[in-house]
Amino acid sequence: MNVTPAEFARHIGKTRQYVNKLIRSGKVPATGGRIDLEKGLAALAAQHDPARDLRPDNPQESSALAGLGYYEARAIGEQIRAKREKLKLDCLEGRLLDLERVSLAGMPEGFPRLRALLGGKNDDQGRV
């Protein structure tokens, strides 16, 4: 049964342009602008790459932001950048403590010493 490229495309679930590309490259035989359905299907089956069956349909779905649109992913990226900048600013302004200093203060009996390191005033019970 001879069909047009558009009919063949509908039959295999592809676009007419894709089928025309297959015809031009010689992968699907066509005579007089028409494709023999059985020969065309056989030609496609002969060129089928079995490794494609193992690949995911959309390889980007495996990423951490899978399923998110462009604007949602961009917003998340901006939030992460803002948090990173806030940490840098806190570090520059001295609002973050060095882990070594905190470890030296000792916990929990080191709370008064920690407050002293931070510049706070301690009363006799260790409260600021």
Image (cartoon, helix red, strand yellow):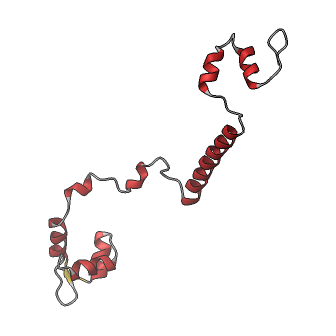
Quarter of the figure that contains the C terminus: top right
> Where 36 sits versus 77, above or below?
below
Relative to residue 4, is residue 27 depicted above or below? Answer: above
Q: Nearer the viewer, residue 47 or 126?
A: 126
Image position of 121 (left or right of 59) = right
Q: Residue at x 35, y 56 (%)?
A: 57
Residue 7 position in % (x across, y down):
30, 79
Residue extending furthest right?
A: 123
Tell me residue 54's x, y (percent): 26, 51
Residue 6 falls in image quadrant = bottom left
x%, y% of residue 19? 27, 77
Name the residue furthest bottom. Answer: 32
Lateral position of residue 4 relative to residue 39, left or right? right
Vertical placement of residue 55 versus 118, above or below: below
Q: Nearer the viewer, residue 29 or 65?
A: 65
Across the whole image, how many numbered discs are drawn on residues? 0
Residue at left offset 69%, top offset 39%: 90
The quarter of the picture where residue 10 lies is bottom left
Residue at 34% over, 75% down:
15
Left or right side of 72 for 46: left
Q: Where's the N terminus, which quadrant?
A: bottom left
Q: Nearer the viewer, residue 71 or 78?
A: 78
Which quarter of the picture shows residue 24? Answer: bottom left
Tell me: 117 left or right of 78. Answer: right
The residue at the point 57 percent across, 56 percent down is: 74
Percent coordinates x, y for residue 53 in the rendering: 26, 54
